[in-house]
Image: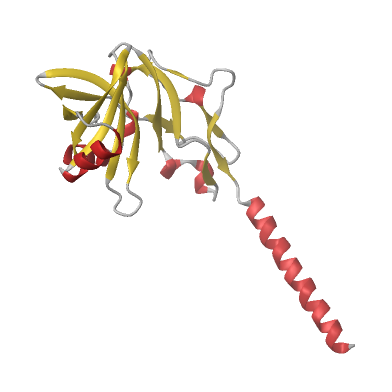
Amino acid sequence: MSKQQITFNVELRERVGTGGAREARKQGLVPGVLYGGGKDPVAISLKRNEVQKAIETGHFLSSTATLVHNGEKQLVIPQAIQMHPVSDQPMHVDLFRVDAKQKIKVEVVVHFVGEEVSPGLKKGGTLNVVRHAVELLVPAGHIPESLEADVSKLEIGDNVKISDIALPSDAEPTITDRDFTIATIAGRSAKADDTSAEAGEEEAAEEEGGEEKED
């Protein structure tokens, strides 16, 4: 399933600074700043319901969005969003101008498949996720919705590395100096050893207590 397209209908914000941002929020808007692309930063206001809807897509900071102002469109990538600590409402948004062919760094979430048939997991192993997302260098107009890691054939002790994941032909991980691990199938021996150690400590403590009473 393709990503839900994000669109923001924006207005230029004449007043800048704290006062201008506060005024925008009173009007039900979210203040923001548009920068990058070799142009000066511009103060803008976004509709709060559109920002909230974008957040609810689950990929607000990992996909491009289209700004619409007076009929003109601009492709952007959200860079940061500030949320209210109590109400959890969006307070401020930073947007960066991009071109569809321009390569940008973006984190893409990893989805795991085949857990129900993984022999390692069936034997009592645990899926230990090292990276829930991978940072890619990819054209702004071709950001994948997610990456797929297949664990269906993994035994205990096996792992999934970035080389095991099929990436789009025009994308590459930003980490290039090693074949880094995405997840491993861990056994429960370590957990069992810890439990045995704890039991041994408790037993030793009980014996010491008994000796003190005898004395």
Instruction: Give the residue at the far left of this rendering.
Output: 71
Task: Locate residue 196: give its quadrant.
Answer: bottom right
Which image quarter is the N terminus in? top left
Residue 75 locus on image (x, y percent): 24, 19
Task: Locate residue 9: give its quadrant.
Answer: top left
Residue 121 vs residue 52, the one in the foreground: 52
Indicate left or right for 172 with 24 as reference.
right
Residue 209 vs residue 76, the one in the foreground: 76
- In this rendering, the answer to whether 213 lies above or below 115 is below
Indicate left or right for 209 with 118 as reference.
right
How is colour applied across the structure in the image? secondary structure
Task: Locate residue 193: give its quadrant.
Answer: bottom right
Q: Can residue 131 be seen from the camera position used here?
A: yes
Residue 107 locus on image (x, y percent): 41, 29
Residue 42 vs residue 154, the one in the foreground: 42
Residue 106 locus on image (x, y percent): 39, 25
Q: What's the residue at 57%, 23% (across, down)? A: 179
Indicate left or right for 178 with 50 as reference.
right
- In this rendering, the answer to whether 157 lies above or below 66 is below
